[in-house]
Image (cartoon, rainbow, N blue to C red):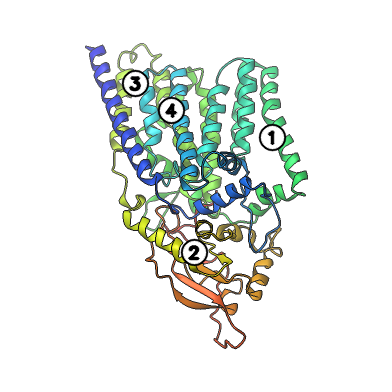
Amino acid sequence: MNRSLRLFLEAVVVALATWQVVDIAIAMSVRFGANFDLEWMEGATLVTGLRASQGLPFYTAPSADYVPFIYPPLYAWVLGALSHLFPIGYGLGRGVSIVCTAVATALLVVGARNEGARWPIAVGVGALFLGCYEEGGTFYDLVRIDSLALMLTGAALVVGRRETRAAAVASGLLLAVAFTAKHNMALFGLPIAIWRWRTLGVRDATAFVAASAGPALAFTVGMQVYTGGLFLTYLLEVPAYHGMVLERALPNLDKAGRIQGAQAEIWRALPFVATAAVATVWAWARTRGGAYWGGAMVAGLVMTALMRGHTGGYVNVLIPMFWLLPLAAVLSERGLARDDGWRAWVPHAFAALVAAQLWEGRVPLKKKYLPTDADARNAAALVEELRALPGPVLMPHGPWYPVMAGHEPSFSLISLWDVDKEKGPLRKASGVVDRAMADGHWATIVTADEKLGHGLNEHYTRAGALAAKPFRTRTGWDVRFGMVWHPKLAGDVDAPAPAAEVGGEGEEDAEGGAPDMP
């Protein structure tokens, strides 16, 4: 009877997991073909890929045409390398992210299996991660660095759990590569090193540290030399002058009495699994992997809280915890199953738990995340309209659209916001944009609002609206283009509108927070 019940519950898990995977695959396939920004930083990321394909440097002083991102270069390098085989564009970038998400999901299934989960439960664990697609801002398939960084970090964690010297070296090397995709991922090296030291000894831990820190340090030094010291300026110094929003970093109550903060957001994404994990954390010590994955989850909680609290931290920064937390169900089950009195029922209980969590998360993806045929038509009309406008064209909210229209790329607004912080190391250098405005450097500027600042209102005049109907981004900050500007002529005497300070309310996203940056 017990075996029949367990098989039934596991069949339910597999059915719900399949349902989840199919739903996400359909959504991603619909979004894959959208030839426009689903999220406002996609186009800016493609610009970095274009620079990689052209052999241009990433980390330079801000200029009127390019302001670097505050991220490592690996994703752009991947796009640049693949551009020799495929056209660089949204399809290429999203294709890379979709493949990385699929591999990361497979790695999670392998990690669950390595901890003793039966195949149906392991597959359910992978589906739980995919089920957090919406809670992660639907970033799994975007032209962003998140999925690549997660895949590499997940590989480092899964390999690092193996108790061999070769695994220590391989895990370290994988984490070093993950560092070149998203440098925050280096934090996961700490729990891996501690676990290997406590479990396998000093030599094994030293091998891991040497394999991870050595290449990462060599990479950093090389990039510092190659960029004249600007690499770490962008990665570390510039973000250091951004603010923190503690309401997003730490648990607290909003005005309606609802718990908010990164931890609450993670819990709401996987409430049954998270509750079971907290309730049975004492049982993890009975499993060999409990300390390992528990340490990784602590590191993940610290990292995601800091990044969510960072000014501009969007919900995509929670994705590593959406990958790690489903493993808690496996660890809890394995720990509790060692009690003779519970052993017969624990597998059934946790199969039911995974099934319940999959069902609870089985909410259709909101339509706001899915592009429409009207969006596609309006985006195509926008590109054609840009093609007819005089260049150079500055489109800071969507710098890839001018490229699609045959113009040269321009800087992205998010990059300008990054460096244009009071007392920041590159604040004075960002004045190059003010000078370009005063000189009428761009023949056309297209914006989503009037709050660009930097002399836009003083030196440019509104030339009306775009003929193409506005369309909106589908996640993150809601950007809708429409305003066209041309340089003022010598005889223009329009009273300038007050310029908004960069980094003010124009940085707010659709959910009331700053636009997604990390």
Which residue is tagged 2? Answer: 387
142 or 344, which lies in front?
A: 142
Point out the tag, 2 or 4, that comes first from the N-terminus: 4
Does the image show residue 166? Answer: yes
**Residue 273 versus residue 287 in the image, above or below:** below
Q: Position of residue 251 (x, y in %)?
A: 46, 47
Which residue is tagged 3? Answer: 120
Does residue 496 appear to the left or right of 323 in the view shown? right
Q: Amino acid at mark 3?
A: Pro
Does residue 6 appear to the left or right of 43 in the view shown? left
Q: Amino acid at mark 2?
A: Arg
Q: Amino acid at mark 4?
A: Ala
Task: State the residue at coordinates (60%, 88%).
Answer: 491
Question: Does the CB distance between marks 2 and 1 fall below 8 Å?
Answer: no
Which residue is tagged 1? Answer: 216
Considering the numbered disc 3 on the image, is that residue within a helix, a strand or a loop?
Answer: helix
Question: Does the CB distance between marks 4 and 1 fall below 8 Å?
Answer: no
Point out the tag, 4 or 1, that comes first from the N-terminus: 1
Task: State the residue at coordinates (31%, 13%).
Answer: 344
Q: Mark 2 and mark 1: span between their CA atoms?
A: 43 Å
Looking at the rendered image, the disc whose residue lies closer to the viewer, 4 or 1, is 1
**In the picture, residue 106 is in which quadrant?**
top left
Which residue is tagged 4? Answer: 328
**In the picture, residue 282 is in which quadrant?**
top left
Quadrant of the image for the N terminus?
top left
Q: Amino acid at mark 1?
A: Ala
Looking at the rendered image, the disc whose residue lies closer to the viewer, 3 or 4, is 3
Looking at the rendered image, the disc whose residue lies closer to the viewer, 2 or 1, is 2
